[in-house]
Image (tube, helix red, strand yellow):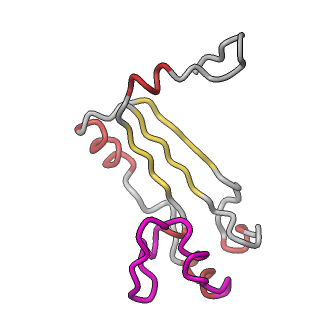
Amino acid sequence: MDKSAKNNKPDMTWFREATFGMFIHWGLYAIPGGTWKGVDVPWVGEWIMRKMKIPIKEYETLARRFNPLRFNARAWVKVAREAGMKYIVITWLIRPFTGRAMDYGLFCFPVLAISWVL
């Protein structure tokens, strides 16, 4: 996106005109999928640890199950295109609580956002 010289803010015209896209928030919180020990926790996906007061040691066990290599990016893009979406943004947090994601064999980014124009 271009920045206007006047106010140094990104030009959001393209984004506003695209109107329809896919945001994927992907991380350890995707594993419980909004449910913890049988309790549904609506609207807090990435905040489930905080909302349910899950102890760090217990939440850390999700890291062993999270494998960001086992997904089908082509299928995601196909679904987005078929639905008429104009972009995909993937964000994820894989620097859990201690800042030592490498302890779990994961890449260490505070928050990473990747976007594609379809």
Q: Quadrant of the N terminus?
A: top right
Seen at 56% across and 68% down, the residue is: 47
Q: Is residue 58 above or below residue 74?
A: below
Q: Position of residue 42 (x, y in %)?
A: 41, 70
Q: Position of residue 26 (x, y in %)?
A: 50, 59
Q: Quadrant of the C terminus?
A: top left
Give 87 or 41, whichever is nearer the viewer: 41
Give 98 or 104, whichever is nearer the viewer: 98
Give 54 or 77, whichever is nearer the viewer: 54
Seen at 54% across and 63% down, the residue is: 27
Which of the 4 image quarters holds residue 78?
A: top left
Seen at 76% across and 72% down, the residue is: 98
Q: Is residue 69 magenta?
A: no
Q: How many marks?
A: 0
Seen at 68% across and 69% down, the residue is: 96
Q: Is residue 50 above or below residue 88?
A: below
Q: Is residue 32 magenta?
A: yes
Residue furthest right as drawn:
99
Q: Position of residue 54 (x, y in %)?
A: 60, 84
Q: Position of residue 114 (x, y in %)?
A: 55, 42
Magenta highlight range: 30-57
Give 107 or 24, whichever is nearer the viewer: 24
Which of the 4 image quarters holds residue 79?
A: top left
Q: Is residue 15 left or right of residue 83?
A: right
Q: Is residue 58 left or right of residue 116?
A: right
Q: Is residue 38 above or below residue 84?
A: below
Q: Is residue 45 left or right of residue 95?
A: left
